[in-house]
Amino acid sequence: MAGTARMKQPGDLRVIRLPCTGRVNPLLILKAFMEGADGVLVSGCHPGDCHYNVGNYHARRRLELLQRMLPAFGIDPGRFHYTWVSASEGSRWAGVVSDFTRRIEALGKIGAEVPANALAKAEQTAMTDATGKTTS
Amino acid sequence: MRIGVFVCECGTNIAATVSTGKVVDAALSMRDVLHAESIQYTCSDPGQRAVIDAIQKKGLTRVVIASCSPRMHENTFRRTVGRAGLNAYMMEMVNIREHCSWIHSDIDEATDKAIDLMQKGVARVRRQVPLHSTTVPVTKRVLVVGGGVAGIQAALDIADAGLPVTLVERGPSIGGNMARLDKTFPTLDCSSCILTPRMVEAAQHENIELMVSSEVEQVRGYIGNFDVDIRRKATCVDAEKCTGCMICQEKCPGKAPDEFNAGVGQSKAISIPFPQAVPLVAALRKEHCRLFIKGKCSVCKKVCPADAIDYEQEDRIETEKFGAIVVATGYELFDWRESYPDYGGGQYPDVVTALQYERMLSASGPNGGHVQRPSDGKEPKNVVFISCVGSRDESVGRPLCCSVGCMYIAKQAILTKEHIPDSQSYVFYIDIRAGGKGYEEFTRRAQRDFGAIYLRGRVGKIYPSNGNLVVMGTDTLSAEQVEIDADLVVLATGFAAAEGAGELARKLNISYDQYEFFSESHPKLRPVETTTGGVFLAGACQGPKDIPDTVAQASASAAKVIGLLSRGELETSPMVAAVNQMRCTGCFKCRDVCPYGAIEAVELRDGREVANVIDSLCQGCGVCNVACPPAVISLKGYTDGQLIAETMELLR
Ligand SMILES: Cc1cc2nc3c(=O)[nH]c(=O)nc-3n(C[C@H](O)[C@H](O)[C@H](O)COP(=O)(O)OP(=O)(O)OC[C@H]3O[C@@H](n4cnc5c(N)ncnc54)[C@H](O)[C@@H]3O)c2cc1C
Ligand code: SF4
Ligand code: SF4
């Protein structure tokens, strides 16, 4: 919608398409930070309004956990944000992108923030927690 | 591996902000890319032909098309590469329009981003494998939920095409709100004269099964194959035996609100909602019945000549299979009372809703069409109409327009003059919305030929005085305060979704807006589809609508359903999850999280129990993919390998 309505947005964001936020593996986000992403944004349908029934409830639990664990890996939690924007909320999306970009610009480059063994560490912790019993 | 890249210019939509030439050059330096070109309009016939030519001449095995949103043309291009002999899923789309040219103005920035996205697309397609959809047989039966004019129209159209239809209505009769109307704008034809024959036709149609006093309890399955539990509510009357003689209603001592007459007048605990009801069968409302409240009565059972009364009757659940579902649950009027204390909040009997007034005007209404005001039965002379009560009013959280209020007020002003020649109507309005065919002329006639006085402004207060009501408002055109001594005040209350609409939407897995009106899949190009395949919308359940629009949408839904079910089988998306059963540990975390019950346990030859995905149930959300501890269940088309490759490529 934001694109169709041609709402101008900062050009730093690159979108990876997924069917549902429920497909977002927290490990993928850590991987992105490892590879040098300055910020990671996850956006999906509003809770209660999931195209796939409940995928975003699973996502919310997994992503909230990740959010809280980021400092343990030496990553500023401000570099990660998850939000809910429906396909019809074009202007909201443009706002989210602009705000997030501004926030990451203020934090600057991720640089040496991420220790080299973070992923290995993450692999162990995130996996067990994020996949623990997740019934809504 | 031979990858071909096509960069669409989309006229100037893309080419004005993205240097497509640079993207082509960059693509040619990417691994395995041996063909790249830009095309003016890739989706056009010559554009698609260029893609097919390149695939065939250069022996391409994978294709990336950088153009618009995949929501727009993914299917188009899948078919294109299919025609060239490739597996349709060996094509990847990269969105350089909505995600790039349309949202950026700096050419360098947009071009850089387009190249990044291209890199990601190439990385993705390199890891793609051919996917094949399976087919599932479809059930050639249709469920229509809601028996208003929308549901009746859809059911008749579908049934006429030879498909069996079950029409489920929660009330005791079909007809919906239109059955309550007196005459209809802008032609003033009598509502029941045009609707009743359609109701009877629906009841008598060999392909339509009517289920009144019934509701959808649960929905399972998917497009082409829904299993629906329908609750047949106990009415204490055997519909087979009841002859519709109404003797029970006459003799019944239990008073009950008259829902059909919108609360004007009273009805009985056992009743037939209105004389033209279809089916013409009595229903008992336990909450008002003396036998059920006080334990003593049974009058109806004694008087019924057909022995149709059965107090023991219980709700039954029937499960039926359907291939498609049309939702036509309509609307209710917004309950204005709490939000408008200045209008008496429901305390003044002579402040009525337009639907109540519609019943007062109707020859089949409680007073046989003689307009009598509720407080003392007097014939009103001064009638004040107030538009937009609970619509276009941010202060009560209802900014939406009901789209018919302006029109039915004009109609009711005309009918008032016809019923009571020495009456005077006043209409308070914000502005007159009369967009339909013949509508503007109609509202003019109300003023010119029937003398209705239109005052532009909101009403601030209504208070009782000397047995009448004083209506205080501002005429914003003359900037004067006006006070009108009214015998009767009619409120044009806004539309609200039918009670329980949100709950029904959740059962059907369709989306709805903040007012619980159901959302169409695309506001322009898919106006009757929902985001759930096989579920369609008709009428006011999707948003406020008049009868012509309701009927048009119902027929459109019917056409979609007929089209869908004309096929014997449906293709399912091959982007489903798959388990590497050799490495599955049998923990079934995937089964716990799957919202569709698409994962079953199967036994391998060595006796181990492992997970298996039922392709026809899997919707491809990928929740299981993340939940699997050994990471052996993976969503085709969105595998871990693909997502990691995309991420790495973007961060190179
Ligand atoms: C005062 C007034 C005057 C009007 N005058 C005119 C006019 O003159 N001309 C005109 O064109 N339009 C007029 N309209 C608008 C008209 O009423 C609607 O356009 C039309 O009734 C919409 O039809 P529908 O079938 O979508 O909904 P409805 O008529 O509301 O029918 C919906 C049906 O679905 C049933 N239902 C609801 N929920 C469920 C459920 N969960 N399960 C099963 N069944 C369910 C309901 O009981 C109902 O029978 C007027 C409206 C009002 C309020
Ligand atoms: S008395 Fe019996 S037959 Fe007559 S309407 Fe009532 S239930 Fe039906
Ligand atoms: S992808 Fe979603 S629907 Fe399919 S099996 Fe996995 S969890 Fe169930």
Image (tube, coloured by chain):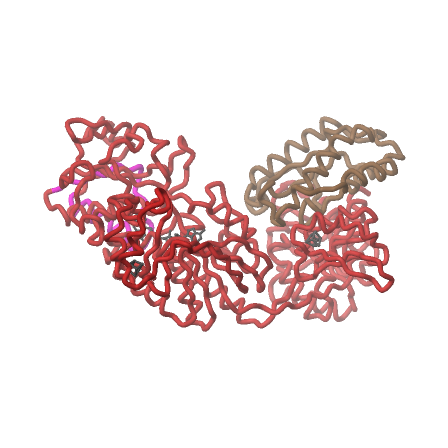
Chain colours: A brown, B red
Q: Is residue B651 magenta?
A: no
Q: Is residue B428 magenta?
A: yes
Q: Can residue B258 be seen in this snapshot?
A: yes
Q: Residue furthest left?
A: B422
Q: Is residue B418 above or below residue B489?
A: below
Residue B489, quarter of picture: top left
Quadrant of the snapshot with the N terminus of chain B: bottom right
Residue at 64%, 34% in the rendered image: A98
Left or right for A122, reference B503: right
Residue at 37%, 65% in the rendered image: B240
Q: Position of residue B342 (x, y in %)?
A: 30, 28
Residue B491, quarter of picture: top left
Range covered by the magenta-colored residues: B423-451
Please give the count of numbered marks on the rendered protein: 0
Q: Can residue B111 be seen in this snapshot?
A: no
Comparing B207 with A16, the one in front is B207
Q: Position of residue A107 (x, y in %)?
A: 74, 27
Q: Position of residue B268 (x, y in %)?
A: 28, 48
Q: Is residue A58 above or below residue B22?
A: above
Q: Position of residue B371 (x, y in %)?
A: 17, 45
Quadrant of the snapshot with the C terminus of chain B: top right
Comparing B408 with A35, the one in front is B408
Comparing B452 with B214, the one in front is B214
Left or right for B247, reference B554: left
Q: Is residue B19 above or below residue B194?
A: above
Q: Residue furthest right?
A: A117
Residue B135, quarter of picture: bottom right
